[in-house]
Amino acid sequence: MPQHMPISILLCEDDESALQTLQRVVARLRPDSTIYSATNGKSGLECFERHLPDILITDIRMPVMDGIEMARRMKEVKPELKTIVITASSEKSAEDFRAKSPVEIDHFCWKPLAFNRLASAINDCVIRIATERGNG
C-alpha cells in the first residue's frame, strides 16, 4: 500500500466541532498529506479551485451549497477526484442516494463517524490514486 504517497485532502463540514475532529483524525491517518478545510460548499469549491486536492471528504447537508452539488462541480474540473461522503442517512437510503446521485461517490461514511471505516475509505482512495498515477 502506498502509505507515504503525498496526497491532498479537502474536508468540508459545516459543524465546526465535527470539522476539527475530522482534521485531527485525518492528520493522524495521513500525516504526510496536505489537508484543506471548508465550512460550506461554496468555500469548499473555492478551496478546491485553488488547490485541486486528490480526495474530497464532505458532509452532504451544508449551507450555501450542499456537498453533492459541490462535488459535481469539482468533478467537472477534475474527474479523477475521489469522493467520500459523510452522512447521517441510513445505509439503505445512502445506497439509494448513490444510485440517484448526479456524481460518482467512492465511499459513504455514516454518522456517528466510525473512524476505522473512514480510514478504510481513505486507504482505498489512496490505493486507487496510486494505481492511476502508475505508483501502485
Image: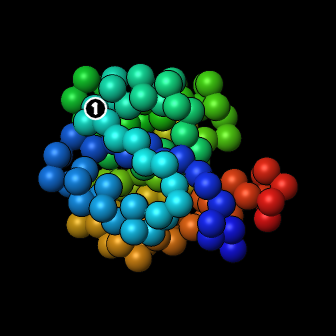
Horizontal and vertical percent position of residue 28? 39, 68
Residue name at image x 51 percent, y 72 percent:
120
Q: Which part of the image, by quadrant, shows the C terminus?
A: bottom right
Q: Residue furthest right?
A: 134
Disc 1 target residue: 40
Residue name at image x 50 percent, y 25 percent:
50
Q: In the drawing, does residue 32 fall left or right of residue 35?
A: right
The secondary structure type at the circle numbered 1 is: loop
Colour convention: rainbow
Q: Is residue 66 above or below residue 14?
A: above
Residue name at image x 53 percent, y 60 percent:
32
Q: Is residue 91 above or below residue 114?
A: above
**Residue type indicated by callout 1:** Asn
Visible residue check, residue 129 = yes
Q: Nearer the viewer, residue 5 or 80?
A: 5
Q: Is residue 114 above or below residue 39?
A: below
Horizontal and vertical percent position of residue 43? 33, 26
Q: Is residue 22 above or below residue 44?
A: below
